[in-house]
Image (cartoon, rainbow, N blue to C red):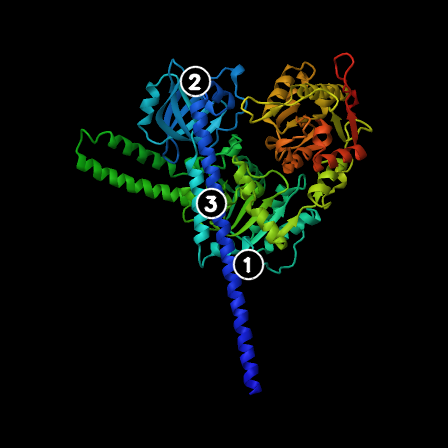
Amino acid sequence: MTLYRNERTVSITVFCVLLQKKDREMKDKYNITGNLQRQRELLKMEYDFEKKAYEEKSKLTGIAWKVKKGICWFPLTIGRTYYNAINQFCVDVFRNTPNEEQPEEDNVFEYGKPVSFFTQSGLGDAKLNGVTGQISYVEGDRMVVVLNREEQINVLRTAENLGVQLYFDETTYQLMFDALRAVENAKGDRIAELRDILLGTQPATFRNNPPLRFPWLNTSQEAAVNKVLNAKDVAIVHGPPGTGKTTTLVEAICEVLNRENQILVCAQSNMAVDWISEQLNDRGVNVLRIGNPTRVTDKMLGFTYERRFEAHPLYTELWSVRQAMRQLRSQTKSGNRKAIHEKLNSLRDRCTNLELSIRHDLFDQCRIVASTLTGAANRLLEGVRFQSVFIDEAAQALEAASWIAIRKADRVIFAGDHCQLPPTIKCMEAARAGLDVTLMEKVVKHRPDCVQLLDTQYRMHESIAKFPSDWFYQGQLKSAPSAGFRNILAYEAPMVWLDTSDLEYNEQATADLSGRYNNEEAKFIVKALEDYTEEVGIKRIQDERIDFGLISPYKNQVQRLRQLVKQSAGLKPIKKSITINTIDGFQGQERDVVLISLVRSNEEGNIGFLRELRRMNVAITRAKMKLIIVGAADTLTRHPFYKKLYGYVEQDGKVVRVPQPDNGVTQTETVQ
């Protein structure tokens, strides 16, 4: 009887354990499904917001405004037409904008983006012609557009006052929606396993191989490469500013290539893909670039699928076959249709076989396939599977975009820094609800065992590096001896805050209330730069190639700074050494001297999106030798971050509370 009771107790216990396990599994499944469904809802909010904004701008804004903002080319000249290597019908278009009317931003037209052509009547209204296409190539004032239909060229040839503008990009959103649905519905396959691991319901697994030594890397970089080599499912290379993330990533990729035949390498932006592709090419790795590069050089174009396709020995025959097919099609109305169709079918079969042969050769020869995240859905990669996908700048990618690439591989390696710039999101409501939380950030939270922090920075003077280390990286970021002490002038403070609280430099809002600027602060910061460069010496700046960065969080302030620097006689000899851009535009870059214009100055202490501290992390960490912050401390230091930063500069740098001038000219000699 006692034995029976014990057995019954054990059975009940086992049953309860199994029930609890099943309950946990159901709960985990519910959490994963809820997460992916929520992502789709937030992505739909972003889609609706961006589409509505596009439609409103199209209706309410004139051509001149669009040209100024860089989202429209007008007027245009139509150039030659031709078929590219992969048999797409292309047209060259040329922008005829005078130099004095060049756009404020000139990087919005990129490979793969959809465009629509229009004409403008004498009354000033724009009429869409229904002619649409996709950008294949952009350089300077020349753009190559792949037309959706060949006969559309007749409309363009006869149109007057022709222009082209960006068209709302439905395709990219559709790819992201499709990826989320596919991941959510996955069952019993590798993507289902990766989904459960990345979203925190299943443990990640690792090989237990002895660590390899890389004497040319530091300890944390070496550990990161070994983390990548031993990860069966996922690994993260967390690279704060100046820690050699790209160097580490390239080393890891090259080591993985000793174990795998081919790797997919992706990033959110074309520019990031170009950069990693170029570094791998310099290591002698055969890279095949899907999509055209942003940095248009012969070296970069040499990576592309189209250029490799054209250079293939079989391409000459393929070109001849395509030409024969076009000639036959033009004869269908006047010749023997049956004979022509039979000949066309024969040529079409030969064309298909040649295209497949070239494609297989190109993919067989390359070791790295490189593309943007959405580019991983390119038809060229249909049916292609990789053991590993590396996603660079993963902390700037929407979760949905990351899944597009992850679906192509058996494991994923993220690289980036979630303490720097988040993804670009237009709908603030969606961002606040969690759309700006990337998949990499979720893995960092759920799977800390998969993360290797690169902890040694080589970029900044140690006084500049210490504050972001303490605030963003829990004091774990240390400075290499080579970067410990860097000065341009003897005994100068590496960090200076020019406090304009006592000056009447009040911020102003743009007409549509979408931005902020501060004219007086812009003049002041340019004067501070003039004084500092005079103190250093123009000849020394030129001889030693000292460079400068002027940064502001606000586009409107950047425009004013560019105009003032252009007008400055004192800065004219070193104009090429000065870069002026938004914080986002400076991501991944560095300068010897950086000046930051914070703009906000008001009695209420409102600082707007300066509360996005990850952007300030980027701004501060661009400086190698000297950082000059210009802003009204009375407004800014009501926020804990800026209060802490101000106190740090007071202690380890130099704070100058700029007084009201007696003669109408504010002095800035105290920058040093």
Q: Which type of secondary structure does the marked residue at label 1 adopt?
A: loop
Q: On the rendered structure, is 335 left or right of 646? A: left
| Crowdedness near tag 3: few (<14), some (14–19) or many (≥20) residues, C-alpha within 10 Å | many
For the residues carrying marks 2 and 1, which lies nearer the camera in this image?
Answer: 1
Q: Are marks 3 and 1 in contact (CB under 8 Å)?
A: no
Mark 3, residue position: 40
| Crowdedness near tag 1: few (<14), some (14–19) or many (≥20) residues, C-alpha within 10 Å | some
Q: Which type of secondary structure does the marked residue at label 2 adopt?
A: loop
Mark 2, residue position: 75
- Disc 3 to disc 1, C-alpha distance: 22 Å
Q: Earlier in the sequence, mark 2 or mark 1?
A: 2
For the residues carrying marks 3 and 1, which lies nearer the camera in this image?
Answer: 3
| Crowdedness near tag 2: few (<14), some (14–19) or many (≥20) residues, C-alpha within 10 Å | some
Mark 1, residue position: 202
Quarter of the figure with residue 150:
top left
Q: Are marks 3 and 2 in contact (CB under 8 Å)?
A: no
Q: Are marks 2 and 1 in contact (CB under 8 Å)?
A: no
Q: Amino acid at mark 2?
A: Pro
